[in-house]
Image: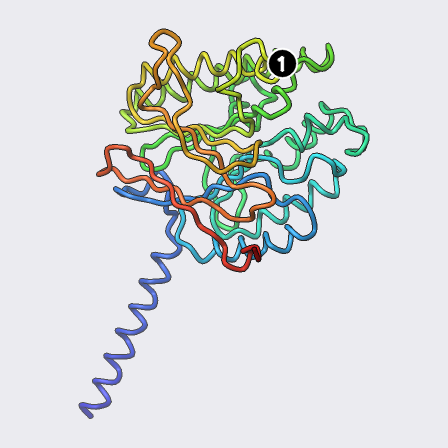
Amino acid sequence: MRRSRRFIWVALLSMLLVGLVSWLEAQPFGNESVAATKFDFGLIGDLPYNPEQEGKFQNLIQDMNKTRLAFIVHDGDFKSGSTLCTDETFYQRYNLFNTFVHPFIFVPGDNEWTDCHRANNGGYDPLERLAKLREIFFRGDQSQGKRTIALTRQSNDPQYSKFRENVRWISNNIVFVGLNIPGSNNNFGRTPEADAEYQERNAANLAWLREGFAIAQRNGSKGIMLVIQANPGFELAPTDPNRTGYNDFLATLEAETVAFKKPVVLVHGDSHYFRIDKPLVGSRSQSRIENFTRVETFGSPDVHWLRASVDFKDPNLFSFQQEIVEQNLVAH
C-alpha cells in the first residue's frame, strides 16, 4: 500500500514538474510584461540569397529555434540584388519567417524594393514594391513568428499613416526601434520620383527616431537599440553620393546619442561584413562618441547569426556573441 502511495506521489510530482517546465517555456520572454535582469535575442540579415543559402537557412532556423531567445530581428535583404522582386518571393519569405518559433521582426532592405527597378529584378516600380511589402509583412500589430509580441507602428499616428514598417517595441524597459532606411543611398539621388519618396520617408524616419529616444528618456531606459538595413557610410564624406541620403539620419543620431548619454546600439546589414565597432565621431569634438556602438550582422554568403544579450549588471548593457551554425561551415 505504501509503495502504491509513493508511486502515486512520484507520478504527481513528475506531472507537476513537466507542467511547470512547459509553462515556463511558453512565457513571452522579452515581452515588456516580464521583468528580467538579463535576456538574449537574435540578429540576422542579408539572407537567404539563393537556393543553396535557402537550405543553409533551414539549419539556421533550427539552431535559433532551439535557443532561448526573447525575439529575432532580420535587418533586411531577404533576397539578392540580382533576383526577381516577385510576389511569389515575397510570400515565400513571409511564410519562411513564420517558421521561427520566436517573435520575428523584419526591417526592409534595398533588395526588396529600392533596387527592384533593375532589369534583372524584373523592372518593377520600387514604390509599388514597397506598398506590397507593407501589405504582406507589416499588417497588424503583432510580430511574425509562431510566438508573437506586440509592436507599435508609426502608422498609428495619422500624420505618418503609410509607414507601417517603422516599428518600436520595449523589452524589459529597453527600447528597440526599427526604421526603413535601406541601402542604395536611401533611395535618394536616382530619379525625381525617388527623391520625393525619400523626402517624405526621411521626415518620418527622423520623427520616429526622435520619438524612440524621447520614450527611452521618459521611461528611464538603460539603453536603446536601433535597427536599419543600410550601412550609412560613417567613414564617407557628407558629399559622397553614397552617403548623401543618410546625412540627416546621421546628424540626428549623433545629437540624440550625445543627449541620451546611455548605451546606444545601431544594428545594420547591407555591406555583408560582420563587425562591432564605434564609428560615430562627434562633429564638434572630432572624437569617437563612447556610448555609441555599431553592429553589422552576418550576411550572404555567411549563413550564421548573432546572439545579442542585455545584462543590467554590465556597464555596457549590450554584448554580442557569434553563433556559427556548424552545418553551414565552409570547407577551407
Across and down, in percent, residue 241 comes to 62, 14
SS state under label 1: loop
Q: In which quarter of the image is residue 202?
A: top right
> Few, some or many C-alpha atoms within 10 Å of disc 1 (few <14, some 14-19, many ≥20)?
few
- The type of colouring in the image is rainbow
Report the residue that reaches farthest toward the front.
332
Report the residue that reaches farthest toward the bottom.
1
Identified at 53% across, 47% down, the residue is: 145
Number of marks present in the image shown: 1
Identified at 55% across, 30% down, the residue is: 229
Q: Is 102 on the left or on the right of 291, as rendered?
A: right
- Can residue 95 be seen from the camera position used here? yes
Q: Find disc 1 in the rendering and name its residue.
A: 241
Report the residue that reaches farthest toward the left.
2
Nearest to the observer: residue 238 or residue 64: 238
Q: In which quarter of the image is residue 49?
A: top right
Across and down, in percent, residue 86 comes to 76, 38
Nearest to the observer: residue 16 or residue 129: 129
Residue 210, above or below 219: above
Across and down, in percent, residue 324 comes to 47, 52
Identified at 37% across, 11% down, the residue is: 286
- Can residue 167 be seen from the camera position used here? no
Across and down, in percent, residue 238 comes to 53, 10
Q: Quadrant of residue 76?
A: top right
Nearest to the observer: residue 45 or residue 329: 329
Residue type, numbered disc 1: Pro
Q: Quadrant of the C terminus?
A: bottom right
Q: Is 32 on the left or on the right of 272, as rendered?
A: left
Q: In which quarter of the image is the N terminus?
A: bottom left
Nearest to the observer: residue 312 or residue 128: 312
